[in-house]
């Protein structure tokens, strides 16, 4: 247990190095610097919490596995991510071996805040190394740290690093190879509490010995306990029992302590000690926290020298006077977000068009030599269409993650969350809901995955349940088709205004629903929003690239497989059982007409006819119903389905043939089917309805069952139906 094992040979265990640290301490940057491209991301078995691992070669040529986990401020977990992180550090997870070394990443520019988590990790009694990161920022802030003295205070190696520049990484690897168990600090606890901890710790040691039974515990005083337990070769053995006693006495009931705390001899020891302390006016938890902070202040006073108001601090304060201002901060936020989304759509559009053209060309090449029939249709309209449905979103998803990484690495994203907390709190959401909701404008799937950072389960559920209201990029083809058909005569400015109103409608619906939920079955105000505002700095391109790659690859793996599978299912529903032989022969020379007849006779077409009486009050007929059925796989499928229904073949939102065919369509009474009221009703439907099975699948995985995704589907579609009904009937009266 003293140092990391140097065992070699084929049977040698690969050492596990676990990273720990506060949020914004640069832990992931250190992980990237240690492992490079030798990384993989997965989930812990049975939970949705991510597991990021990589490999590092130590100076003695041993391979070690490095595990990166969520940042946390203390060992008391407040979110699923933090709970897993602490279980890993304590060696409590069956799916993860006990860490051989813990590397605590400490932000040198915020040493005192970071030392609290470090002080708790020291009590775990595992080989530990401190990576003193952001030393360059500390110097810019006018801080000078006596690193050798800090190392001596802790009894372990402390390595100066600048993660994003890879400075000190080789020295960190050397320290990992020879990591040792830290010396347990002498916390400045009240003397009565020290006596009780010695008594309880000694009792635990005796209970742990085969030579003593539990009945002898009560008769041992502190003197005999110390002399008995320290008789072996390890004088620090009792310190470890005292550390466990401290955790028990302050009420820490992690999985590794549950059974111990529940045993009658130990529970009696704890109850007696707690009673004696409280009779003397000492609350064990408060005394422990205060002692840790007094120790931190004492260490920092000897380690840190500070200049008065260094330039970096002054610049951060000057910028924050504007960006955190109640008025100018909101205007700045609006400008930055507008620039982000304009750039997102402007830059992604040509890339998405190129991907669509490329997939189409490959599909045509692969199916060109096949006769018309089920196989060719499966390949072209099922498999290649499914691949295209996944790949076409990659530019927007990747660019969104790039922009978010830039905002985060620069320090602004934390400010944006702080600004939005003022507004989100009023509707029952949390400041940390901002990032998931922002991500949902590209796709609800990464947005829902991002809710893992929200500690409180109720806050997290509220955010998940309203995230799909954010108008994702999949809705844009439908918006573009309908706005182009019915609002083009009013000019580009009017079209842009309608598009903006659709986004505003989604945001307003999310706010209203969040308020309603927080006053009913998700009752309560959002939990306290505690956020650290990092200093401003230039984003590191390597870090931005890694974050964009990780986020995009996760989207492809998690959502892509579902979208692809559902695309094939939708193809089958729109292809089978097919038209009768007579119709097939009659329309053999007109493939577009045959495709329209096929979809009319398909399972999807029959379902469209079946739901026509239900959707008729919204102004829709069975053909629009078929489009709505197809849109449950992916919203953008509505446009291509309309192309098939109207016998124009391949069609997109810019297709003139599709627009002409839709405009020419008539109801049985001769009136036009596609009118402005119908378009307005359909736009409202697509803003509010839950028509994305991929999103429902992700919600099911994140919430652990079908209860919440089914609720989401029912309430969103009911709301969409009611709003579309009011929109159509009101608009029809106005037009008439």
Image (spheres, rainbow, N blue to C red):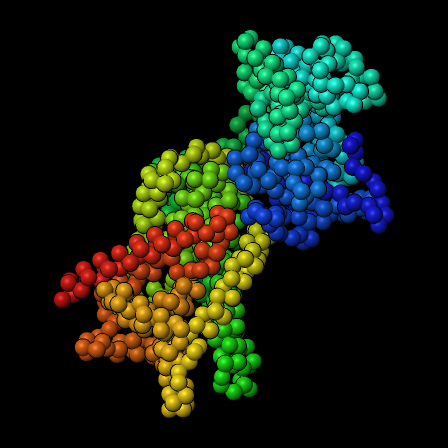
Q: Give the percent coordinates (x, y) of residue 595.
A: 40, 81
Residue at image coords 53%, 77%:
379
Q: Quadrant of the N terminus?
A: top right
* Residue 78 horizontal side relative to residue 149, left or right: left
Q: Give the percent coordinates (x, y) of residue 449.
A: 50, 50
Q: Is residue 301 visible?
A: no
Q: Give the percent coordinates (x, y) of residue 190.
A: 61, 12
- Frontmost residue, 301 versus 357: 357
Residue at image coords 68%, 40%:
18
Is the residue 356 above or below the residue 579 in the image? above
Q: Name the quadrant containing residue 370.
A: bottom right
- Frontmost residue, 398 versus 100: 100
- Frontmost residue, 490 versus 436: 436
Q: Quadrant of the C terminus?
A: bottom left
Q: Is residue 600 visible?
A: yes
Q: Give the percent coordinates (x, y) of residue 635.
A: 40, 64
* Residue 22 horizontal side relative to residue 720, left or right: right
Residue at image coords 58%, 10%:
276
Q: Name the quadrant containing residue 343.
A: bottom left
């Amino acid at each position: 247990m003293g140092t990391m094992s140097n065992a070699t040979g084929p049977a040698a265990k690969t050492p596990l190095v676990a990273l720990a640290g506060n949020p914004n301490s640069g832990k992931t940057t250190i992980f990237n610097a240690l492992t490079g491209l030798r990384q993989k991301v997965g989930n812990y078995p049975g939970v949705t919490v991510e597991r990021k691992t990589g490999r590092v070669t130590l100076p003695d040529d041993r391979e070690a596995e490095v595990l990166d986990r969520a940042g946390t401020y203390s060992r008391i977990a407040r979110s699923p991510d933090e709970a897993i992180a602490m279980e890993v550090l304590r060696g409590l997870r069956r799916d993860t071996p006990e860490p051989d070394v813990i590397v605590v990443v400490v932000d040198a520019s915020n040493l005192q805040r970071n030392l609290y988590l470090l002080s708790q990790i020291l009590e775990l009694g595992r080989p530990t190394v401190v990576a003193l990161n952001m030393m360059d920022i500390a110097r810019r802030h006018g801080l000078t740290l006596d690193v050798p003295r800090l190392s001596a205070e802790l009894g372990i190696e402390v390595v100066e690093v600048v993660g994003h520049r890879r400075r000190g990484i080789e020295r960190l690897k050397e320290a990992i190879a020879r990591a040792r168990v830290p010396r347990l600090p002498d916390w400045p606890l009240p003397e009565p509490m020290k006596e009780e901890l010695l008594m309880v710790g000694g009792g635990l040691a005796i209970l742990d010995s085969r030579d003593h039974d539990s009945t002898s515990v009560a008769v041992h005083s502190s003197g005999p306990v110390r002399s008995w337990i320290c008789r072996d070769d390890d004088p620090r053995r009792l310190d470890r029992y005292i550390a466990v006693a401290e955790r028990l006495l302050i009420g820490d009931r992690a999985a590794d302590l549950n059974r111990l705390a529940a045993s009658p001899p130990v529970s009696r020891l704890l109850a007696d000690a707690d009673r004696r302390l409280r009779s003397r006016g000492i609350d064990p938890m408060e005394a422990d926290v205060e002692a840790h902070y007094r120790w931190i202040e004492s260490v920092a006073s000897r380690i840190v020298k500070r200049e008065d108001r260094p330039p970096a601090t002054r610049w951060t304060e000057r910028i924050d006077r504007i960006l955190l201002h109640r008025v100018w901060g909101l205007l700045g936020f609006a400008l930055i977000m507008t620039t982000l989304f304009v750039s997102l759509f402007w830059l992604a559009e040509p890339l998405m068009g190129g991907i669509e053209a490329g997939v189409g060309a490959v599909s045509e090449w692969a199916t060109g030599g096949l006769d018309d029939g089920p196989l060719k249709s499966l390949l072209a309209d099922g498999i290649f269409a499914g691949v295209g449905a996944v790949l076409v979103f990659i530019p927007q998803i990747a660019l969104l993650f790039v922009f978010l990484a830039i905002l985060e690495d620069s320090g602004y994203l934390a400010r944006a969350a702080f600004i939005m907390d003022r507004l989100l709190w009023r509707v029952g959401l949390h400041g940390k809901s901002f990032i998931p909701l922002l991500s949902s404008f590209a796709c609800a799937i990464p947005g829902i995955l991002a809710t893992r950072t929200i500690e409180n389960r109720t806050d997290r559920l509220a955010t998940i349940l309203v995230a799909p209201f954010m108008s994702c990029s999949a809705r844009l083809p439908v918006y573009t088709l309908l706005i182009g058909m019915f609002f083009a005569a009013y000019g580009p400015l009017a079209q842009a205004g309608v598009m903006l109103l659709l986004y505003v409608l989604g945001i307003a619906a999310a706010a209203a629903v969040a308020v309603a939920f927080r006053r009913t079955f998700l009752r309560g105000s959002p939990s306290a929003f505690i956020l650290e505002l990092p200093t401003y700095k230039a984003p590191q391109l390597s870090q931005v690239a890694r974050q964009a790659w990780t986020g995009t690859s996760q989207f492809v793996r998690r959502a892509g497989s579902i979208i692809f599978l559902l695309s094939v299912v939708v193809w089958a529903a729109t292809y089978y059982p097919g038209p009768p032989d007579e119709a097939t022969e009659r329309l053999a020379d007109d493939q577009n007409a045959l495709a329209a007849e096929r979809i009319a006779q398909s399972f999807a077409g029959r379902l469209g006819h079946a739901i026509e009486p239900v959707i008729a009050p919204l102004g829709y007929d069975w053909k629009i119903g078929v489009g709505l059925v197809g849109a449950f796989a992916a919203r953008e499928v509505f446009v291509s389905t309309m192309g098939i229904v109207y016998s124009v073949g391949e069609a997109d939102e810019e297709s003139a043939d599709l627009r002409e065919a839709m405009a020419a369509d008539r109801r049985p009474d001769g009136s036009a089917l596609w009118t402005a009221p119908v378009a307005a009703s359909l736009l409202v439907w697509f803003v509010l309805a839950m028509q994305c099975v991929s999103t429902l699948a992700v919600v099911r995985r994140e919430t652990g069952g079908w209860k919440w995704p089914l609720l989401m589907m029912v309430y969103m579609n009911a709301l969409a139906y009611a709003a579309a009904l009011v929109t159509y009937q009101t608009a029809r009266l106005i037009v008439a």
